[in-house]
Image (cartoon, rainbow, N blue to C red):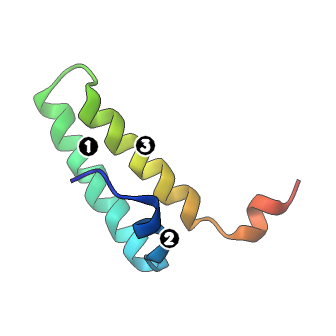
Amino acid sequence: MAIIKLSEMKKMDSKSKIEKIKELKLELMKSNVTANKTNAKTKEIKRTIARLITLNTPKDVLKKK
């Protein structure tokens, strides 16, 4: 479930990205309860959350340096 393509992420609006982040964080908590060590599933969930957060930031914030 954690694998979401970049093209699908770009098509989402801001509200749906926030909802997806919440779902993935809940899934991450559930998977961490069952396994003490990180595995491929938790890594993929973390990457997907990071991508969604990055795509959800305003473009003005990213361009300022």
Three-letter amino acid code of the residue under disc 3: Arg
Splitting the image into 4 quarters, where does residue 37 fall?
Answer: top left
Above or below for 64 versus 59: above
Of pointers 2 and 3, the one earlier in the residue sequence: 2
| Residue to which mark 1 is pinned | 28
What is the x, y in percent for residue 60? 78, 69
Answer with left or right where residue 19 lies relative to residue 50. Answer: left
Point out the tag, 1 or 2, that comes first from the N-terminus: 2
Residue at point 16%, 42% (across, down): 30
In the image, residue 24 sits, relative to residue 55, either above or below, namely above
Q: CA distance from mark 1 to mark 2?
A: 22 Å
Q: CA distance from mark 1 to mark 3?
A: 11 Å
Residue drawn at point x = 28 percent, y = 24 percent: 38
Q: Residue furthest top?
A: 37
Q: Is residue 61 left or right of residue 23?
A: right
Q: Amino acid at mark 2?
A: Lys
Q: Secondary structure at mark 2?
A: helix
Q: Which residue is mark 3?
A: 47
